[in-house]
Image (spheres, rainbow, N blue to C red):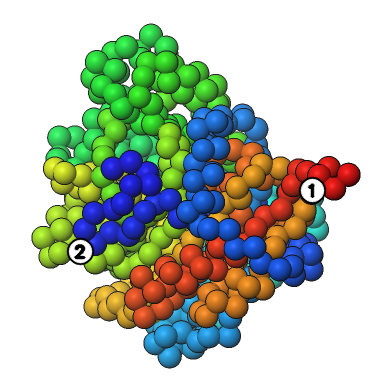
Amino acid sequence: MTPGAPAPGPFPGPAARLSDDDGSHPPRAGAIGLFRHAARPARAPPAAFLCASLTAYAHRVRNRVPNVIGAVNWSLCIRVESTEQRHDGGGSMTTPLADYAKFAGKRIAIVEHMQNHPFVLGLHQAREHGLEVWLLTGDRSWYTHGHDWDSHPLAAAVDRVVDVDTTDLAAVLAAVTDESGQCLVDGLTSFSDYHTVIAAQAAQRLSLPGPDPEAVETANEKDRLRLALGDVPYNIPHARVSSREQLDEAVRKLGFPMIAKPPAEAISYGVRRVDTMAELVEAYEELSGVRHSLRGQPRSGDVLLETYVEGVEVSVETMTVDGYTHVFGVTSKDLFGDPAYIECGHTFPVPLSDEEREALYAAVRGTLEAIGYRHGPCHTEVRRTETGWRIIEANPRTPSSCMTMLVTDVTGRSPILDAWLLTIGEAPPIEPVVHNGGAAVRMIYPTRKGTLTRVDGIEAAAAVPGVQVLLHVEKGDKLLQRMDNSSCVGFTYCAGADREEAQALADRAAGYLDFVVEEDERGERGGES
């Protein structure tokens, strides 16, 4: 199935609707000022038109990726919501119903952090239950873009900020131990794709609870994941290439179409489909020139090629405790932007037949067992093909964007807080997993490239019953600088009686939002003269 085609069976409808990470990209402080510019009449452009416009733009951009650090502007700045309460009577939206009293008196260190609203919200919720949180960061300005740290959302969400080189294991260890080598924290972890390995290494060195660092690294290095899976039917043929001369052999092995992507990255950075040798050469030349990750770690320039598998993509949200993988449920994924694959929406939970569910869960659990992942959250992306499920990626962290909110509102348990319980050595009582209602998020992407001047329609969007509007851009931001999940400018989120109702409300709210750029206003002034 190509992006934009109707999804079969119980899966969501067209992907071409208005719209995740890793979500660890930097917010700007002080962006709430944009809200004062945004109270204007709503124009409500059709959602399908917005996604179709951005899909056409994706073809032109071809996912060209600058080799710069801090190029992603990921601001957490505006949150407005209707006065509707949760459908299940559980109080304010996205408040876990589970008991997290075991946080009381405990202290954890987090190596860098995700910046979407749910992850800042999770910090506040954990601290309300008595957890003390230290944030270890290598560069505060990466989060603030030159603004004052004290006005940044994270400043009020943690108890202490420790400035340390978060790529240096010895430095991380020194930051959480005293002069005698005594550990000062009860747990150490990270949800940032770029720091999950070093966090696991540090936890292991300190004899703190955590996953096997080798398992985490195998999951993050996607070709290593393929090698670990071997000949299982849910694996995908692949080739890792380090030179132009290896492309011909890769084509003979994999054929077209294929997927080209960096072996280790996040936010769909650099991922694209290639259908011809010319497109493959172009993709290789671009991706092999990227020698640093978005967080500055060195990269080899190798490119991972995989056989393209046709099908509907979902993700499975899990928590592995002492080697047993608990499943919260299955999340739908809307994609757009062929040849790039950008996430534009999610719903939870996806209904499956008993046979489908059994096969899917077996593939996910088998994947985690194959890499030795016995502890922690995982967000596993899977495609349903004509011949069965195929593992796309296994991300050893909680899901990004607002997917944790979907799980929390439907199950009553927060994957973020459950992961932190594991971090301090407590086993979260996840079973039985009960689904109450459904939830949906629509990721919002601008339709025009340019410099943001204002956002129209915020008040109308926030008036849609049950919807939270979460925007993370400010006046002056450059929109659509690169085609991946980092181009997302916000979310509309809703929990409802079921996922279809929630999706309809989130889509309706998203349709009111219009991101006006300077180029629009210059055109309007030019037409008046």
Position in image of residue 308 (x %, y %):
29, 33
Position in image of residue 146 (x %, y %):
79, 50
Amino acid carrying label 1: it is Glu
Label 1, on which residue? 524
Label 2, on which residue? 352
Q: Please say if 238 is above or below 281.
A: below
Question: Residue 28: which quarter of the image?
Answer: bottom right
Q: Alpha carbon of mark 2 to alpha carbon of mark 1: how far? A: 50 Å
Q: Please say if 178 is above or below 81.
A: above
Which mark lies nearer to you, 2 or 1? 1
195 horizontally vs 457: left or right: left
Of the 4 image quadrants, the one containing the C terminus is: top right
Observer-nearest residue: 56 or 247? 56
Residue at image point 20% right, 64% down: 352
Q: Can you name the residue that lies furthest to the bottom here? A: 89
Amino acid carrying label 2: it is Leu
Question: Residue 168: which quarter of the image?
Answer: top right
Q: In this orientation, does residue 343 appear?
A: yes
Position in image of residue 444 (x %, y %):
55, 56
Residue at image point 60% right, 47% down: 447
86 horizontally vs 426: left or right: right
Q: Which mark is residue 481?
A: none
